[in-house]
Amino acid sequence: MAGANLLALIDDIATLLDDVAMMSKMAAKKTAGVLGDDLALNANQVQGVKPDREIPVVWAVAKGSFINKLILVPAALLISAFVPVLITVLLVLGGLYLCFEGAEKVLHRFLPHADSAEEADERLNNLADASIDLVQMEKDKIKGAIRTDFILSAEIVVITLGSLQGADLTTQILVLSGLSIAFTIGVYGLVAGIVKMDDLGLYLLRKSLTGGYNSAQRIGGRFLLTAAPILMKVLSFVGTIAMFLVGGGILTHSIPFLHHLAESVTQLIPQIALILSIAADGIAGLIAGTIIAFALAVFNKVRQ
């Protein structure tokens, strides 16, 4: 009797694990795009940090990301069970925040502002004084990165939860928890590798010169040194675009009016419906972010 009960328990566990693996694979596919945006945004956030502080900053943001998911996973399960409509509201607010951040970066870069020269001088002074301002700059970067991660993590959790509709609570908890841990380790492991590319290139180049001539090490070192700044610039650009695409995508999928408008746009040329859909998300994000940025600018002017 005990043996039969044990075999039944093992069979139940195997079935549960099989369901978890299958649903995890399905959820991972649906969140792949958001994960790419998460990687680009977080790699962009680490720019401007001293080389010897890059890994500690990435580690601090990764710890913040784990805390974010520790809050988001149980909160999403509770909201989904008791107030499911609130998830959509929170997603829209998060999408608007991402659009605003992207618009703020674009407007600050391309629109003239009187204090641009003063800001440039301040950045140079900060870089020259490592004992005062850089510490606060680093803290600000970490806080900003954790805030952005919170929004992207919320979307990942909600998308994952949406793909688990109909699954029992145990399966939902296991899939959400497992994917949250795996995604965090994967994203921030890649971010750490990206930001240390130049250090690895310099190490290989020095080793090829001091330890006897090694053409492979020399070529590899030069390639990494050349590719690192290019990759960071590309990720900076992609990260800004990702804010509009992710934020705009949340808006177009959550607000019925925008959803119908985006669908009508994609039906204009069915052959390139996917491209038109992505473009619609980006344009919606750009417009929403620009409106919020200008509204806040006017509000600040009036308040002052």
Image (cartoon, rainbow, N blue to C red):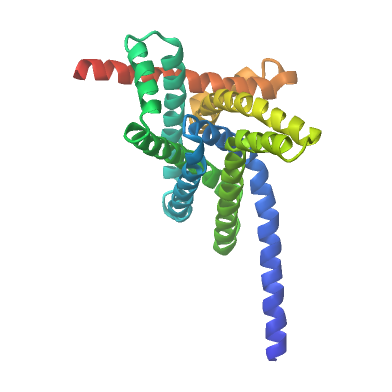
The furthest residue to the bottom: 1
At a point 40% along the width and 36% down the height, the residue shown is 138
Q: Quadrant of residue 196?
A: top right
At a point 58% along the width and 39% down the height, the residue shown is 191
Inspect this view and state whether residue 165 appears: no
Which quadrant is the N terminus positioned in? bottom right
Left or right position of 256 against 199:
left
Give percent across and percent down for residue 246.
54, 31
Which quadrant is the C terminus positioned in? top left
Give percent across and percent down for residue 54.
50, 39
Is residue 30 depicted above or below 280 in this figure? Answer: below
Is residue 262 depicted above or below 16 in this figure? Answer: above
Give percent across and percent down for residue 50.
47, 34
At a point 67% along the width and 21% down the height, the residue shown is 275
Q: Nearer the viewer, residue 167 or 291?
A: 291
Left or right position of 192 against 111:
right
Q: Nearer the viewer, residue 176 or 264?
A: 176
At a point 53% along the width and 33% down the height, the residue shown is 41
Q: Nearer the viewer, residue 157 or 147?
A: 147
Give percent across and percent down for residue 94.
44, 35
Inspect this view and state whether residue 171 appears: yes
